[in-house]
Amino acid sequence: MTLDESALSRTASQYPPSAIRGVFDRVAEQERLSGEPVVKLTVGEPDFDSPAHVIEAAMDSLRAGGTRYTPNTGIVELREAVARHYGQRWGRDVLPDNVMITAGGNEALLLAMSVILDPGDEVLVTDPAYPNYLGQAHLLKAQTVRIPLEPSDGFRLTAELVEPMISPRTKLLVLNSPSNPLGTVIAPQELEKLVELAERHGIYILSDEVYDRIIFGAQVGVQRVTSVAQVRPDFGRTLVVNSLSKSHAMTGWRLGFVIADARLVAPMPRLQEGIVGCLPEFVQRAAVAALDGPDASTQDMLARYERRRDRLIRGVTDLGLGYVRPDGAFYLFVDVRGTGLTSAEFTDRLLHEQRVAVVPGTAFGEAGEGFVRLSYAAGEETIDSALEGIGMFLASL
């Protein structure tokens, strides 16, 4: 029996589709039809293994019987580890009551939005931006208002761009620094202006900081403010979302967290009960080891990402293409407007003619038109093969 789509709820039938997933589907179809592999610069996933001491901690927990239910908020040892780690990094007090453990960064986003938004509330999201923000807001029946960023300004977010978009229904501003897909980092002085703006208008800030460990160069050194939570410790309208997926190559472990005022965290365990209930203990024990253990693997990843970034930038420059210089994350937003092709045309033809996969900039919003996102969470051989294919494609034009 075929289900009539009209029988679906509006929440399900109107959920915004992911153009990124669409690329993945087309890549799989291309590989199936041709029988040959596609060179992929699409996936935002580290190509490194999880650290050995993290895996050992999970195995130790499994052997000790860590396969039972855990508290909805997360085990206290992990909440303490998160509080300790970020308290030290931010130079401010963070307590376990400020921490909610979640099933990855996406559930952290959903819980953070859930304690702030009611149906009809407005959420400010940049354009371009990570598309799942739109889906999370849609699930809560909130309205997304896009803040268009300009290529001529390097797609930089400023308080001056945000303020005209605020209305009486605005409840939440979503920040992402370092950014997916841009790799840009919001400057400390701009974070201060954004916090002041939020205070003045009585709105909350949801800061997605899952790439906060992947910041390059002395220009954006570790001593500089990188989190909105560092701007004003007494600002109680900040919710920081993070995970171990990018910093510790733990995407499949699905371990994330929210750090916020204890009054905002307090309702989250009740919501967690109705979503995933709790996270496996062995995953949480592994997360404690990741936060408290040696940092060498993260530092090694960072150094290798920076080399890959520079290699990709050199290659793109040699091909005559412009780009947004990334200060963090592992993405390069490349300007293809000079080809005369749209973002979708460029990515589709590149895939079919050279078997190289990248993501169209419009997957992240209308302001991404004319750009494509290249991920350098891939080995140098893959990067070189992709650059060769892109070069051949450009020559064919």
Image: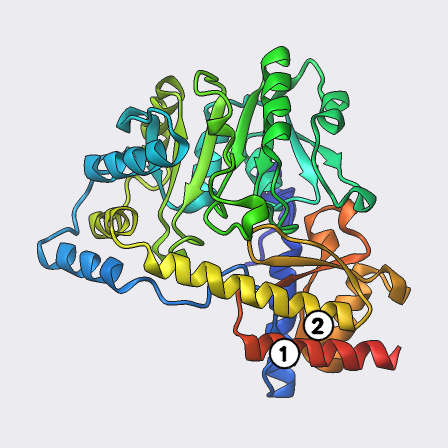
Between residue 369 and residue 30, name the one nearer to us: 369
Secondary structure under tag 2 reads helix
Q: Earlier in the sequence, mark 2 or mark 1?
A: 2
CA neighbours of label 2 inside 10 A, class few (<14), some (14 to 19), many (20+)? some
Q: Taking 292 as reference, is 79 above or below it? A: above
At 71% from the left edge and 75% from the top edge, which residue is drawn? 351
Q: Taking 198 as reference, is 288 above or below it? A: below
Secondary structure under tag 1 reads helix
Percent coordinates x, y for residue 191 in the rendering: 59, 28
**Label 2, label 1: how many angstroms apart (C-alpha)?**
8 Å
Q: Quadrant of residue 71?
A: top left
Report which residue position mark 2 lands on. Answer: 315
Asked if the residue under mark 1 is in contact with the one under mark 2, i.e. CB atoms within 8 Å, the reply is yes
CA neighbours of label 1 inside 10 A, class few (<14), some (14 to 19), many (20+)? some
Q: Amino acid at mark 2?
A: Gly
Location of the C terminus by quadrant is: bottom right
Direction from residue 344 to residue 55 in the image, left or right: left
Report which residue position mark 1 lands on. Answer: 384
Direction from residue 183 to residue 221 in the image, left or right: left
At 83% from the left edge and 45% from the top edge, which residue is drawn? 152
At 21% from the left edge and 47% from the top edge, which residue is drawn? 281
Q: Taking 111 as reference, is 292 above or below it? A: below
Q: Which mark is residue 187?
A: none
Q: Amino acid at mark 1?
A: Asp
Percent coordinates x, y for residue 367 in the rendering: 78, 45
Q: Is residue 42 visible?
A: no
Q: Nearer the viewer, mark 2 or mark 1?
A: 2
Q: Quadrant of residue 336?
A: bottom right
Farthest residue, direction left: 64
Percent coordinates x, y for residue 74 in the rendering: 26, 37
